[in-house]
Image (cartoon, helix red, strand yellow):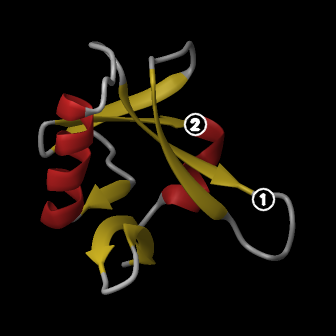
Amino acid sequence: MELQPVSITPTAANEIRYIMQNKGIPEGYALRVIAEGTSGCGGARFRLGFDKPREGDQQYITQDIPVLYEKRHLMFLMGLEIDFEERETERGFVFNRK
């Protein structure tokens, strides 16, 4: 079984696929999930981007979306859920712990 530390809600998956298809993301790129601030006591912050796989990356596919992460971030990413919310004045991806 392939390890999938980060899950993506259907709403977020739809938005990610839209971005990949309509915002000039090059062929062969994947969604990269990044954990930042992992050395302090304040907890990790998360970012998303699109990138080509690099040596040492871990990769899996969920909901037809290729996902990349660095192995050293695994313990911070386990159980993370990416969602997408639209509110009256803002919209964007949010990170939840399952």
Residue 12: percent from left, percent from top:
24, 60
State the SS at label 2. Answer: helix
Amino acid found under the numbered disc labelled 1 = Gly
* Residue 98 horizontal side relative to residue 48, left or right: left
Q: Nearer the viewer, residue 21 or 62?
A: 21
Residue 46: percent from left, percent from top:
58, 59
Residue 81: percent from left, percent from top:
36, 67
Residue at image coords 65%, 64%: 45
- Does residue 82 lie above or below 97 as drawn? above
Disc 2 versus disc 1: distance between alpha carbons? Answer: 15 Å
Residue at image coords 39%, 83%: 89
Structural crowding at the residue carrying mark 2, measured as other residues with C-alpha within 10 Å and reported as few (<14), some (14–19) or many (≥20)? few
* Residue 45 horizontal side relative to residue 64, left or right: right
Placement of the C terminus among the 4 image quadrants: bottom left
Q: Residue furthest right?
A: 40
Amino acid found under the numbered disc labelled 2 = Lys
- Does residue 42 lie above or below 56 as drawn? below
- For residue 71, the mark is 2
State the SS at label 1. Answer: loop
Residue at the disc numbered 1: 37
| Residue 1 seen in render | no
Q: Residue furthest bottom?
A: 88
Placement of the N terminus among the 4 image quadrants: top left
Q: Nearer the viewer, residue 85 or 88?
A: 88
| Residue 58 seen in render | yes
Residue at image coords 87%, 66%: 40
Q: In the rendered image, which quarter is residue 61 located in?
A: top left
For the residues carrying marks 2 and 1, which lies nearer the camera in this image?
1
Residue 96: percent from left, percent from top:
42, 76
